[in-house]
Image (cartoon, rainbow, N blue to C red):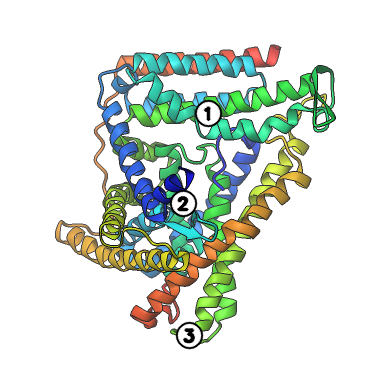
Amino acid sequence: MSNALHKKRDFIERSMLSALAFLKDATLSEECANRKGFLQSLDPRFKTISFLAFLVTAVSLKSAVLIGSLYGLCLLLVFFSRIPLNYFLTRTLLFIPLFSLCIVLPTLFSMVTPGEPVWSFHVLGINAIITRPGVDGALLFVVRIATSVSLVVLLSLTTRHSELLKVLRLFGVPQLFVLTVSMCYRYLYLFATMVENIFTALKSRVGMVSRHQHGQNIVAWNIANTWNRTTQMSEEVYMAMLSRGYTGEPQLLSEFHATLKDWFWLLCALIICAGLFYRGHTL
Amino acid sequence: MHIPDGYLSPATCGVFGAAMIPIWSAASRKVKKTLSVRQVPYLAIGAAFSFVIMMFNVPIPGGSTGHAVGGVLVAILLGPWAACIALTVALVIQALLFGDGGITAIGANCFNMAFVLPFTGYYVYRLISSNSPAGSRRRVIAAGAGAYVGICVAALCAGIEFGLQPLLYHTANGQALYSPYGLNVAVPSMVLGHLVVIGWVEVLVTALVVKYLQKQDAVFFEGGRS
């Protein structure tokens, strides 16, 4: 069984899955961003500033309880923005926070973090002691990471990606860089589809590659071929830009319109952050 | 190697963000000089290429697979300054749109993966390849060595950044506020994984791709595009 599973996930399948995962993530994000929810109705500029304020607050606070309250607010916003909770929790908790929990596990024990013992047990003849500073530190670390990841994913899920990239202009990022980022994002779809096509073709013609050296050569050849296609494409894109009047000075269209609701939201967000900072200081 | 939000203190993130500003500024000046108005499509597509390299899974002995970061390969193909911008663009997209690598840690991630990795790798490549012919085997070996050194030095930087956190940011009773392990744990655990496994995947991909590109158009490696 395990052998069969192992064979199913060779490098061809994994590469196809990587490309498909990117396309699936991007499509699902756009679908969520187009829903009629609370966060989707806000101006991307105000939403980004408020989320950055939340993020800086989450990273700066030293109390797991206060950061946890920010996580509670994040889940509330998920609900009002009509994002499927299961999808959100799977996407935010399964990878980075779970990985962080594994990293931080040894710090629970007195060998790494000495202090007041809260629980002890015997394992393989060793007396393992879990300490209070160890639990507090691990909790703070994991809650902070889960909250930070959730905030970033929520911002990305409720804002159309093209708009989110345009917001970079707000922070003084040069127009040329924003244009490069926006163009790069568009080409990612094309390249991800290209990678998926390459490996689908390989799967249908070759099936499975049993020798890893042969597989390595195939991958390298395909990366080299992708590079050749990208350089060719950059020339064609440049010519297309010239034919449409590009002079080397990019101009981005801005379609953002702020309403009273956006200002009110930003004010609330800043008050929440200030309140949490104040509470963090007095604790 | 992508550092998520919450692993580094805000002050550390600020320092690395500030350190990257002159590097980005120098990179954009250099690239503007060499690429002129062609830079936008060239860099955008170069950035997309560096993003896409990670989608190619490489079979490794033992039946497992891994993927390369491709930072040194991009530096050899585009030149280190253009690679710095292309990798920054890829990292910004990963952090902002896919939650891969933190937004507050973007300065640190760019320092490790868009500055240290391509520059170290590229100059090791230049040092070893020297004035060898464009189609020579020496260039393939140089590319592999550059990739290995580049990724290991970048991992060392990430390890030092993690390891400094408990020394600099802790409570009165010594409890770490951010990444919990000191230099004695963080540095070896970051570096060993790259020295033993990830570095070799990087060597394999970079060297083989350079070898294939040499076969197709060896002239390309005469001086690169930096």
Say which of marks 2 and 1 sits in front. 1
* The quarter of the displayed image where residue A5 is located: top left
* The quarter of the displayed image where residue B33 is located: bottom left
CA–CA distance in space, label 3 to label 1: 48 Å
Q: In the image, A103: left or right of B76?
A: right
Q: Which residue is mark 3?
A: B136
Say which of marks 3 and 2 sits in front. 3
Q: Secondary structure at mark 2?
A: helix
Q: Check disc 1 and give the amino acid type.
A: Ser
Q: In the image, B134: left or right of A64?
A: left
Could you classify mark 2 by the number of other residues whose Cα lies within 10 Å: few (under 14), some (14-19), or many (20 or more)? many
Q: Which residue is mark 2?
A: B88
**CB contact under 8 Å: marks 3 and 2:** no
Residue at the spot 59% in from the left edge and 79% down from the top edge? B128
Instruction: Give the percent coordinates (x, y) of residue A34.
Output: 25, 27
Q: Which residue is mark 1?
A: A148
Q: Check disc 3 and give the amino acid type.
A: Ser
Residue A238 vertical position relative to residue A96 in the rendered view, above or below? below
Residue at the spot 51% in from the left edge and 23% down from the top edge? A54
Residue at the spot 35% in from the left edge and 40% down from the top edge? A165
The chain to which mark 3 is attached is B
Say which of marks 3 and 1 sits in front. 3
Residue at the farthest left position: A243
Q: Check disc 2 and give the amino acid type.
A: Thr
